[in-house]
Image (tube, rainbow, N blue to C red):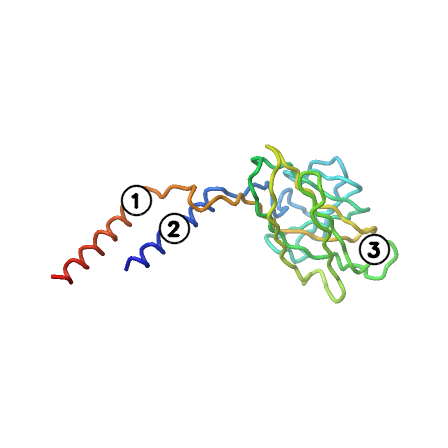
Amino acid sequence: MRSKLFGFVAASVCALGLSAHGALLINPSFEQPVVPNPDFQYYYAGDHSITGWNIVGGSVDVLSTNWNAHEGKQSVDLAGVSQGGLYQDVSTTAGKTYRLGFWLAGNSELQGTPGTGPLIKMMNLSWGGSKVDTLSFDVTGKVKTNPGWTFHTYDLTAAGGTTRLEFDSAVPGTAGPLIDDLSLVELAPPTTAPLPAGVWSGLTGAGTLAVARRRFRRK
């Protein structure tokens, strides 16, 4: 009984520790603004139309309902009319570690057409102004109704109170890497979040009952 009780306490603390530090990104699935065109809409560097995000390089395009987004109805191609990218400045705490998750695919339209770029789409991921990784995605055999989304996750440490998270196309052309369904949460120590009073009272009651049962059995 004791091991089960302690196991429940540990699980409860861990769950509360993670939930106490919620999602930090604005518009993580690129659902705003709503693109009326069922295919896509171009947005150029300096345009702030994509809620929470800033566009750099050339341009990006928000893919709409003709494409199979990983979450919701929209996703982003990091190469619009030309190679581009986007970033968001996130509120962070120096020394804290954050877990980033996102889904990656590639624009498979017009494969082999001049100007669309190679079949291997590549993307640079940067955190705090430094490149973290270059990712690749092969669009061979993929279609926009089944892009083949793949999940990637990174644990990243912040150096200050604001940290820039940036995604950039690393290949030329108008059809680039796709991203969608992002998440960013602070990884808090599991014991930093106190249990609510109701949970403590329940655990105390369970512990008291367990002790009473053991004493009754000894008599």
Could you tell me the amino acid type at mark 1? Gly
SS category of the residue bearing label 2: helix
When the figure is inspected, residue 141 is found, relative to residue 51, above or below; the finding is below
Could you tell me the amino acid type at mark 2? Ser
Residue 117, numbered circle: 3
Horizontal and vertical percent for residue 201? Answer: 27, 45
Horizontal and vertical percent for residue 46? Answer: 75, 35
Q: Quadrant of the N terminus?
A: bottom left
- What is the residue that sits farthest to the right in this orientation? 114
Q: CA distance from mark 1 to mark 2?
A: 12 Å
Q: Residues within 10 Å of mark 1 (few under 14, many from 20)?
A: few
Residue bearing mark 2: 12
When the figure is inspected, residue 13 is found, relative to residue 3, above or below; the finding is above
- What is the residue that sits farthest to the top in this orientation? 161
Q: CA distance from mark 1 to mark 3?
A: 58 Å
Which of the 4 image quarters holds residue 58? top right
When the figure is inspected, residue 74 is found, relative to residue 88, above or below; the finding is below
Residue bearing mark 1: 198
Q: Is residue 39 left or right of residue 205?
A: right
Residues 66 and 28: in front is 28
